[in-house]
Image: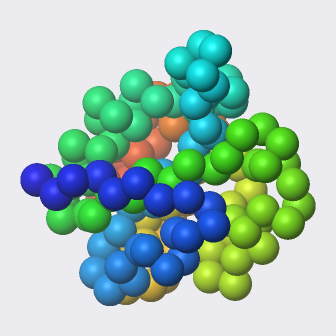
Amino acid sequence: MQQVIQVTTSNYCEKVNKEGKAALIFVGDILDLTGQSWCSDTVEAEPIIKNYAIPELQQRGYQIYWCWGGDKETWYDQNNPARNSQWIKIREVPTLLLIHDNKEVIRFEEEQLFTEKELKQYLEQQ
């Protein structure tokens, strides 16, 4: 299986291979104090993302990009590159985007990632 590539909101547009299938996972950064993300939605979704989404998507030929959204202040800054990207704008963390040949196919945000239900339904139709 391919490795998960670590990127940030400031470099994901350049780092992501826009040909083929890619899964972009945007999450809040980890706090040194707690060892968990500052974003409670990221904390809740992380087990589903790591234990279900990543293995399932890798098996289906997706290259996985784990995109660190920054600390809370950076994420909410309206000048955050992910919020202003000409390619793909990110509104929430966590977000899972599936990209086929440089086009967004589907987007899962926040509570849609708390269970595997919606992602599983989508993948079963493919």
Examine the rendered structure and indicate whether residue 83 appears above or below residue 75.
Answer: below
Q: Position of residue 63 (x, y in %)?
A: 28, 64
What residue is shown at x 30% (from left), y 45% (from top)? Answer: 54
Residue nearest the observer in this picture, 118 or 26: 26
Residue nearest the observer in this picture, 107 or 38: 38
Direction front: furthest residue: 32
Direction left: furthest residue: 1
The answer to whether residue 25 is seen in the rendering is yes
User: Which quadrant of the figure has residue 30?
Assistant: top right
The image shows a total of numbered marks equal to 0
Direction right: furthest residue: 78
* Quadrant assignment for the C terminus: bottom left
| Colour mapping used in the image | rainbow
The answer to whether residue 108 is seen in the rendering is no
Q: Position of residue 11 (x, y in %)?
A: 55, 70
User: Which quadrant of the figure has residue 77?
Assistant: bottom right
